């Protein structure tokens, strides 16, 4: 499989797309060849005799393999899948017809652990460095790679955990100073020497713009061997397809044979894009409902095929979804042009305001005894609206983060303080290390130069 830019550059091998993060023309890498279910391993229902507690690495590796380089051995792909999903991902029926896929049992207690773990391991291959240099025809001035990541909360912690202590790699996390929770911040400000944190005044969109500017600056990108671990990097989206396949298989094992509707809390739209790719490749018949907060760029685009370039970010209780200019909307636009069938499973976008988000948190706690994060609450609110409107398919809500990462919002809605995820309890001790910079390429370059 080769990859092209949404703006025309390429094709390039996956290793190059992973290394560069952003295409040289400023676009996002996408598969050059449409992948359909017939090109992958059979998406038929799994064998019911298989122990559902065992992880189906073989089946998942078969489905992912067409997206990977042909010189990656079968054993290597299975190992990569196993290491990527090395924590539980349970599918639970929360209420009749509404399931939650718990994606928060990894090291940073958020769904982004899946993409970050895959990317860290894939980038460690020697072939990545060789192919990227051959394509760019430029030698970097240093052997160290810099993973530059903008975060609205969870990405920074997941990437920092995945790359913490990895030789030859440093991570630079750029985050909105007032736009993340204290626990989210501590996940990337209390780690080792190879993780740097940069606080920027303003919203996440300013951080994302700065990272894109750096990746698109040839001299800067080559000098520091910049790559991105945001969902602008195709290496984040490919592994996220895995849990859609996993969930569809598990739903069948639980005796539910209808094709599901996935309800996806959406901010930068990477998770949704990965789901649509997964549907094309191995879950035919599945549909998708995007669950949005008041940052509703996708809903407006679906309704009018227009993007408001100067739309301001709105702060909401579901802060990791506070993205006014979602990068992956460019991938969805490309899919609509290049492979229109890939967007057919997207049934729409449901906008959930702040009050409805808190109501969803409160109702979930009262009715089920479960505390959920505010982003998952947005998804549950959208799912309940769909059910009330007559949706009959099983609804799978992606539970994107542990409730304990958002104690203030959860307490406000329910009056209950969620327990801290065990994997993160130690983040409350130890000093923090971060710097404040303006959203300026010059200031970012100065940090990279003197780090």
Image (cartoon, grey):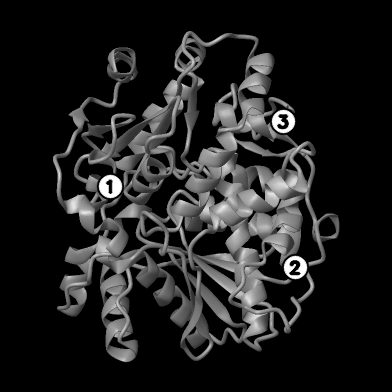
Residue extending farthest to the right is: 38
- Callout 3 touching callout 1 (CB < 8 Å): no
Q: Is residue 437 left or right of residue 61?
A: left
Q: Is residue 44 left or right of residue 438?
A: right
Which of label 3 and label 2 is nearer to you?
3
Q: Is residue 150 above or below residue 400?
A: above
Q: Which mark is residue 85?
A: none
- x 50%, y 68%: residue: 89
The first of marks 1 and 2 along the sequence is 1
The first of marks 3 and 1 along the sequence is 3
Q: Is residue 280 left or right of residue 260?
A: right
Query: Mark 3 = which residue?
Result: 13
The first of marks 3 and 2 along the sequence is 3
- Callout 1 touching callout 2 (CB < 8 Å): no
Image quadrant holding the C terminus, namely: top left
Q: Is residue 373 above or below residue 186?
A: below
- x 50%, y 51%: residue: 269
Coordinates of residue 207 in the picture (x, y in percent): 34, 34
- How dense is the environment of label 2, judged by Cα within 10 Å: few (below 14), some, or many (20 and up)? some
The quadrant in which residue 22 appears is top right
Q: Which mark is residue 187?
A: 1
Q: CA distance from mark 3 to mark 2?
A: 27 Å
Coordinates of residue 260 in the picture (x, y in percent): 63, 76
Mark 2: secondary structure = loop
Q: Nearer the viewer, residue 185 or 305?
A: 185
Q: Is residue 59 above or below residue 1?
A: below
Mark 3: secondary structure = strand
Image quadrant holding the N terminus, namely: top right
Q: Is residue 339 visible?
A: no
Q: Which mark is residue 284?
A: 2
Q: Is residue 216 above or below residue 355?
A: above
- x 26%, y 80%: residue: 362
């Amino acid at each position: 499989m080769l990859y092209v830019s949404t703006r025309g550059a390429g094709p390039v091998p996956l290793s190059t797309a992973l290394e560069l993060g952003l295409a040289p023309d400023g676009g996002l890498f996408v598969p050059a060849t449409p992948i359909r279910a017939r090109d992958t391993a059979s998406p038929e229902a799994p064998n019911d005799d298989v122990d559902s507690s065992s992880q189906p690495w073989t089946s998942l590796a078969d489905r992912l393999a067409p997206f990977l380089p042909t010189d990656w051995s079968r054993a290597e792909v299975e190992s990569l899948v196993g290491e990527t999903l090395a924590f539980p991902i349970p599918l639970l029926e929360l209420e009749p017809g509404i399931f939650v896929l718990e994606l928060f049992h990894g090291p940073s207690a958020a769904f982004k652990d899946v993409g970050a773990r895959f990317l860290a391991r894939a980038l460690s291959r020697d072939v990545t460095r060789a192919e990227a240099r051959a394509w760019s025809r430029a030698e970097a001035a240093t052997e160290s790679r810099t993973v530059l990541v903008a975060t609205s909360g969870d990405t920074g912690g997941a990437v920092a955990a995945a790359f913490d202590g990895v030789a030859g790699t440093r991570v630079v996390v750029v985050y909105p100073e007032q736009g993340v929770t204290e626990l989210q911040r501590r996940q990337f400000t209390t780690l080792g020497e190879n993780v740097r944190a940069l606080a920027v005044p303003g919203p996440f969109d300013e951080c994302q713009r700065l990272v894109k500017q750096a990746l698109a600056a040839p001299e800067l990108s080559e000098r520091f061997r910049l790559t991105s671990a945001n969902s602008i990097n195709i290496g984040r989206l490919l592994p996220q397809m895995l849990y859609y396949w996993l969930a569809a298989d598990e739903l069948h094992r639980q005796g539910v044979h209808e094709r599901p509707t996935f309800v996806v809390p959406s901010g930068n739209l990477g998770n949704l894009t990965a789901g649509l790719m997964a549907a094309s490749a191995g879950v035919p018949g599945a549909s998708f409902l995007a669950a949005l907060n008041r940052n509703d760029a996708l809903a407006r685009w679906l309704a009018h095929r227009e993007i408001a370039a100067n739309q301001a970010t709105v702060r909401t209780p579901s802060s990791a979804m506070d993205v006014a200019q979602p990068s992956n909307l460019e991938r969805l636009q490309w899919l609509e042009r290049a492979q229109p069938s890939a967007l057919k499973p997207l049934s729409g976008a449901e906008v959930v305001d702040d009050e409805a988000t808190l109501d969803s948190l409160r109702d979930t706690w009262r009715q089920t005894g479960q505390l959920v994060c505010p982003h998952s609450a947005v998804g549950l609110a959208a799912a309940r609206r769909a059910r009330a409107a007559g949706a009959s398919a099983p609804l799978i809500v992606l539970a994107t983060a542990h409730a304990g990462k958002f104690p203030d919002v959860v307490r406000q809605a329910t009056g209950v303080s969620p327990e801290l995820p065990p994997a993160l309890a130690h983040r409350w001790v130890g000093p923090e290390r971060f710097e404040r910079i303006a959203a300026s390429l010059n200031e970012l370059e100065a940090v990279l130069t003197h780090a």
